[in-house]
Image (spheres, helix red, strand yellow):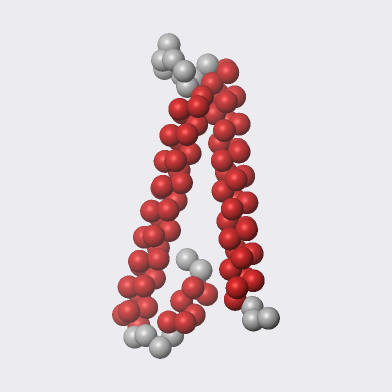
């Protein structure tokens, strides 16, 4: 967890800081799982057509790999843009 997130909470008692830290950690885990589940669902729906065998065929495997790469690149770009916007909002003009 990024400790700078707790910077404004210095006035709180230590117990409350620990609770807030635990809540933030839980939210981050939940968001990570939600992103992973979204990735799996989207790529599976787009790439897997039939259930002929237990493993993916070459075309499905290529599709899943490309889908996952695009999804992760998109997520990283959104995160970077969000950070840029936060940084711009934090600095007074």
- Check the picture and name the quadrant holding the C terminus: bottom right
Above or below residue 66? Residue 37 is below
Position of residue 13 measured from the top left corner of the image (x, y, whole percent)? 34, 86
Q: Indicate the quadrant where residue 60 lies.
A: top right
Q: Indicate the quadrant where residue 70 lies.
A: top right
Left-right relation of 45 to 68: left
Which residue sits furthest right?
Answer: 93
- Kindly identify the residue that appears in the image at 50 percent across and 27 percent down: 46
Above or below residue 13? Residue 50 is above
Which residue sits furthest bottom?
Answer: 11
- Kindly identify the residue that appears in the image at 61 percent across and 31 percent down: 66
Position of residue 52 measured from the top left corner of the image (x, y, whole percent)? 43, 11
- Kindly identify the residue that appears in the image at 64 percent across and 81 percent down: 92
How many numbered marks appear? Answer: 0
Q: Indicate the quadrant where residue 83 lies.
A: bottom right
Which residue sits furthest front?
Answer: 93
Left-right relation of 46 to 82: left
- Kindly identify the residue that appears in the image at 57 percent across and 43 percent down: 72
Seen from the viewer's position, the closer of residues 2 and 87 is 87
């Amino acid at each position: 967890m990024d400790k700078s997130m707790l910077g404004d909470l210095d006035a709180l008692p230590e117990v409350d800081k620990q609770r807030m830290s635990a809540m933030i950690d839980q939210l981050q885990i939940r968001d990570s799982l939600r992103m992973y589940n979204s990735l799996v669902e989207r790529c599976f729906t787009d790439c897997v057509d039939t259930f002929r065998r237990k493993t993916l065929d070459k075309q499905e495997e290529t599709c899943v790999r490309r889908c996952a790469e695009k999804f992760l690149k998109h997520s990283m770009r959104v995160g970077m843009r969000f950070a840029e916007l936060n940084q711009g909002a934090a600095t007074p003009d």
